[in-house]
Amino acid sequence: MPIFVPNKVYLRGILLHYFIQKKSAAEAHRILVQTYDDNALSDTTCRDWFRRFKSNDFELEDKERSGAPKKFQDKELEQLLDEDPSQTLSELGKILQVDESTVSKRLKGLGMIQKQGHGVPKNLPKSATEAHRIFVQTYGDNALSDTTCRDWFRRFKNNDFELEDKERSGAPKKFQDKELEQLLNEDPSQTLSELGKILQVDESTVSKRLKGLGMIQKQGHWVPPAMHPEKRPLYAQRHDKVILLHDNARPHVAKPVKTYLGNA
């Protein structure tokens, strides 16, 4: 199971999603606990955010508080952890010039607790197709496209949980055969255009790779070599069956038939 530790803004976004779906704060909190366990927001926090949403306040970031300024920004702490995630509370506190309890509280607020694996409730979407359907039902024309949902699910399966757009280099994107096979296993009816968009390559690249894998399209679905229809048997394998030829057949084609009929 991939390791993913959600931060507070991500969890607030999930709360907003369930608020739009007309679920209660208690129900949303229960789902968060089932999914993220110790990393879930508290019941009190969930109720607080639902009150904000009911007041048409949909800003998910923390608001600036009056009074004493923050001693350090969250991004400073995150940057230190990016540089060396093995640093202790004591080491982080000395660098940021605060006590260990302050660092501990901030880390908990950021959801920086490493935990391997988590349970997934049955009512959560298990496929990109199901997630896309829920998005369309909830957000209508503002929902992500089916192709985009498939692309993100593929990233998550590769342990890529970065939600911001990544900078693209000039070099064309490479992909493994197993990525293409995985997409076809999920939905064999996808077109070259759809596959190309997900893999971020042109249609010709997808077509060549499919040809290399021996995949052909049959009745709108891509099928592997084992499912290919058998090639037309040769004449010598037809036993006693007669093959009717057209009137202008070439002599080298008609001769075997003439011999066959003469021996019949």
Image (cartoon, grey):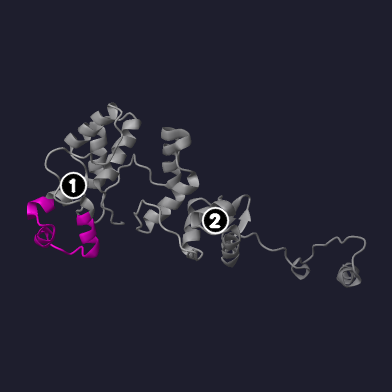
Residue 117 is left or right of residue 220, and the answer is: left
Nearer to me, 168 or 128 = 168
- Picture layout, residue 239 above or below residue 97: below
Q: Secondary structure at mark 2?
A: helix
What residue range appears in magenta? 76-104
* Tag shown at residue 196: 2
Q: Does label 1 or label 2 sit earlier along the sequence?
A: 1
Mark 1 vs mark 2, CA separation in Å: 39 Å
Type of amino acid at the residue the image marks with label 2: Gly
Instruction: Identify the residue at image location x=34%, y=36%.
Output: 17
Other residues around mark 1 within 10 Å, as few (<14) / some (14–19) / many (≥20):
some
> Residue 227, how many percent across, how many down?
59, 59
The residue lying at 38 percent from left, 59 percent from top is 158
Q: Secondary structure at mark 1?
A: helix
Nearer the observer, disc 1 or disc 2? 1
> In the drawing, what numbered circle is on residue 194?
none
* Residue 150 % position (x, y): 45, 50
Q: Position of residue 12 (x, y in %)?
A: 27, 40
Q: Quadrant of the C terminus?
A: bottom right
The mark total stands at 2
Residue at the spot of label 1: 109
Is residue 206 shown above or below 143? below
- Whether tag 1 and tag 2 are in contact, CB under 8 A, the answer is no
Left-right relation of 55 to 242: left
